[in-house]
Image (cartoon, helix red, strand yellow):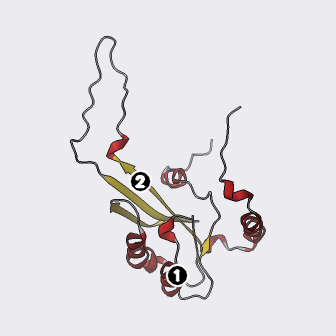
Amino acid sequence: MGKTLHDAEQDRPDVAAARERWKADQASLDPSKLVFIDETETNTKMLKTHGRGPVGRRVIGKPPFNHWKTTTFTAGLRLDGITAPFVLDGAMNREAFLTYIEKMLGPTLKSGDLVIMDNLPAHKGDKVRALIEAKRKAPLPAALLPRPQPHPARLRQAQDPAPKSR
């Protein structure tokens, strides 16, 4: 059987209590008002170091010479699909996240929407909370989920077409 790692902070009493409250409150949430924010990134340093090819022939890979690049994709996931897609040339930071909220996510928010995000440092802070609250014109606070939360694979799954029933 495999091993699954969990963040050690999950064992802290305050974090465990927050997680339990979050689980208990989920049933009262309106799914059409939930907006899950997540990022995924790729980097040219993610170059494969091994490959498969015809027997007896070497597989040749060519990494970029001193042109390493990170690209970040951020989006909101709603009940009815992806919203506010954003591609950033670089890694996500607080300034870029505030720009994302202002220019991309903000115009899509409606009164009563609940914005849910993980604990990426760029997501934290009074400016982030104030901007989200101002954009959606509602007094409900933005929720920060205890880690771990939406994995980048969730965004990839959302992009795949739904399986057809047989």
Residue type, mark 1 in image: Asp
Residue shown at 52%/55% (left/top)?
A: 158
Question: Toward which corner of the image does residue 106 lie, by quadrant?
Answer: bottom left
The numbered dot on residue 41 is 2
Residue 85 located left or right of residue 17: left
Give me the residue at 57% from left, 46% from top: 163
User: Image height check: is 38 above or below 144?
Assistant: above
Residue 111: x and y in percent read 56, 85
Rendering quarter of residue 74: bottom left
Quadrant of the frame with the N terminus:
top right
Q: Is residue 144 left or right of residue 67?
A: right
Compared across the picture, whether 105 is left or right of 113 comes to left
The CA span between labels 2 and 1 is 25 Å
Q: Residue at x 65, y 45 (%)?
A: 5
In the depicted view, which residue is nearer to us: 11 or 131? 11
Judging from the image, what secondary structure is the residue with disc 2 in? strand
Q: Tag on residue 126?
A: 1
Looking at the image, which residue sits at the far top? 56
User: Whole-percent x and y of residue 146?
Assistant: 65, 64
Q: Quadrant of the C terminus?
A: top right
Q: Secondary structure at mark 1?
A: helix
- In the rendered image, residue 80, in percent from the top left (x then y), is placed at 55, 65
Which sits in the foreground, 134 or 2? 2
Horizontal side of residue 40 vs 27, given as left or right: left
Q: Nearer the viewer, mark 2 or mark 1?
A: 1
Give whichever of 100, 92 is nearer the camera. Answer: 92
Residue 97 against residue 47 in the figure, above or below: below
Q: Amino acid at mark 2?
A: Glu
Residue 100: percent from left, percent from top: 40, 72
Q: Count residues near mark 2 (Cα–Cα under 10 Å), then give few for <14, some for 14-19, many for 20+.
A: some
Mark number, residue 77: none
